Amino acid sequence: MFCYQILFVIMTTLVVTNNAQIIPLSSYCHEVHDLCTCEPQSNLVRVHCPSEYAMIMQITDDGTNIAMSYYSNTSVSWLPRFDVQQVAMFEFDAYNYWSETFFRDLLSALGVQEVLKVQFRDRSLETETSLQDWDNPNEQQFANITNTWFFSPVPALEYFKFESTQQVLPATIFQAFDNLTTLELRLAVRELPSQLFSSISHSLQTLSIVNPHMFHFRPEMLRELQQLRNLSLKLSPPPGNKSDQLRNHVFTSMLQLEELRLSRANGHVDARMFTGSNRLRFIRINKNPQLSELPSELFADQTNLSLLDLSCNGLSKLPVDLFTSQGNLKLLDLSNNRLTSLSSELFGPLKSLGKLLLNQNSLTALNPTTFADVRSLDFIDMRGTQFYGVKLNMPFEALVCTNDDICQYKSDHWECDPHCICWVQRQTRQLFVDCRGAALGNLPPLPHTRLVSTVLKLKNNSISELPDASEVIGYANVSSLSLSDNQLSSLDAVRQLPANLTMLDVRRNLINVLDQSFITHLQQENNTMVMMLAGNPLICDCNALPLLGFVRAQPQRVMDIGEIYCSSWPDKPFQQLEVWELCPSYVLLIGCILGGLVIVACLISVFYLIYQQELKIWLYNHNCCLWWVSEEELDKDKTYDAFISYSHKDEQIIGELLPKLENGLHAFRVCLHGRDWLVGDCIPEQIVRTVNDSKRVIIVLSQHFIDSVWARMEFRIAYQATLQDKRKRIIIILYKELQHFEGIDSELRAYLKLNTYLKWGDPLFWNKLHYAMPHNRRVLKGQKKHAGPLI
């Protein structure tokens, strides 16, 4: 039994008849042979046929392409039938020739009615098994097999791509494709049959031929392609045939031709090659290294040409009148040639030219007016050219140069100083002014432009002082300033540096110090300037302290920080110096100040410890620092600030106490038993209730108080409340000297011995009394609490 294999891959989904509905993946398995397995997997169906049905088929569901690898002839009856109206792309990899009817039978078996595109790859030379190697082949089955390719008519076929490594191509291979509009050939033949395109000449519009091997092309083959609009030839001429490949009137009869691509065609083109082909809009003649010159009348009839690609040839010069008829040309590619110069009149007729590519040439000089007449030009690529400082009178935005400094520009609006070279970096829209080594003693006038900023290079001059930023035209727009190797001895950041300066290079000057005003300018919030300072004879004294602080705080803004040295410390980098090394007197001053502060702090502490009480009293009475002297709000729910306990025989003092307590800066709520108690209520209960509702109990201590039973009871209740709350609530005012101290109750006697009391008549009596009263932070100047009786 012989074995064959067909690898059949459906790359994407198929469209059903005119309704364009997607066939469910599972339906592909309905018509598969019984010996094959069919398994839907995600977005594809995998079909496997063992033994003589050695076939694998994959079907995905996102398009209309079929891919098939053909290894040997056999019946196609085992294939699943799709019954589809149209397939967008059918791809073949054919490893053996098939019978004349195979292609028609294949489409019939699949149920495919129309195919729009076919890609065919001839892999017959890669076949490992030939017909002669088969075991007992069926002679009747292979009787019609030939050693050439046959294609049956394919309805609706518009595009055919044929790839083959055979050296001979049959003349009738395309005769079945009546409606073919696009043909792509990738061949390895020595010669094409003269009648190869006869059967498709009436419909063919696009033709592409790629033949990388030595190939003899017959131009007369193209003369019958009257409908051809797009032609691409990538050929390799045989040795010794450098002039006949594309000579004479090869394209003159192709009146519909619009696009032409000639690559590796030959080393010479005939002046009459395009005569009469006036519909050409696009011409590409490239990759012909032997093509060194072009005839001046080559494009004389191509008035509609909009794109011309002459790149990657060997062109060394161009005729001055080459483009006289190309007023509609928009893009011209002359890159990767050997051009050394361009005539100032060459581009004059190109009134519509917008893009010009001159990169990778050997240009060494250009006339300033070379592009002056091309007003529409907005892009010129000149990278990889060999000139420097060329002057071009044209808009700077159009130019792209290599090292930023190749192109120098003249403008109607500004002129570059004769000692300098000016150019514009197109990407950043920056003006570069290079005055290095020009022996300048002052800043030159700068072009005043509308560009983003100016980069000014003044290295290796004799500039000793910078002017005011407002005095030099264009100087205010400088963003990068290089002044290395000059004679600057000082810098005034506010007056001499542009406001938008982001980079300053003052290496190897005579600068001794950068003062505090300069550092203050650098430390402004919106200042991001970086600088280079090495090579200056810095004096490392107290005046250098601001600079030392800056480089330590923002080292990233001093680009050469490790290369800065002081004249007095040549072996130690500036950033590693200590403050005491720069300024010993400064350290002494700081020490004296700190010592003085310590002494003052000690004196204040001693004063506070000695006069703590008096200080708090003074602060409280002057309504200052109440956060320091106010008590906690533990008594915020109590009704009275104070209850005055006194003998009715001492009512005289009450007349003096009450106005002072209930009025003034500190107004308190005061309770008097004679004024605020309820008439008829139980006295002991009222004493207990009043003491509990009061933050303080003021005892007016006199001999009359000691003799009063009710007064002593009030003290005892207040004393018990003090012990219970563990807070001092009792304020004792010694109204009059006691006559019989021994007759005082033991509790009162003990309290007097252990606690201080106020003496009536003391000069500080009222200050001390107010301080002993409850402290309220919310009582401020101009505010009074309600005082007076509640009943």
Image: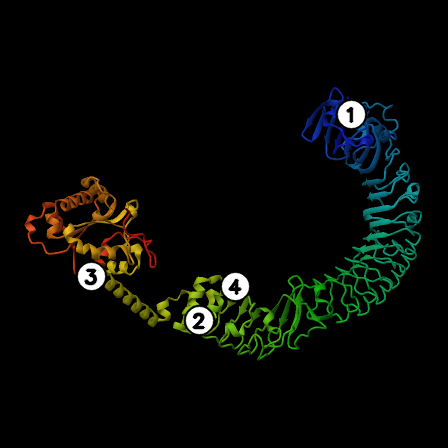
Q: Does residue 529 sit above or below 246 in this rendering?
A: below
Q: Does residue 284 sit above or below 18 in this rendering?
A: below
> Toward which corner of the image does residue 302 lie, by quadrant?
bottom right
Residue behind mark 4? 526
The tag on residue 764 is 3
Q: Earlier in the sequence, mark 3 or mark 4?
A: 4
Say if mark 2 contacts mark 3, CB within 8 Å.
no
Q: Earlier in the sequence, mark 1 or mark 3?
A: 1
Q: Earlier in the sequence, mark 4 or mark 2?
A: 2
Residue behind mark 2? 516
Residue behind mark 1? 80
Q: Earlier in the sequence, mark 1 or mark 2?
A: 1
> Toward which corner of the image does residue 782 lie, by quadrant?
bottom left
Q: Quick one: which residue is furthest to the front in this view?
A: 680
Residue 139 is situated, as x and y percent measured from the top left of the image, at 86, 24
> Toward which corner of the image does residue 188 lie, by quadrant?
top right
Q: Secondary structure at mark 1?
A: loop
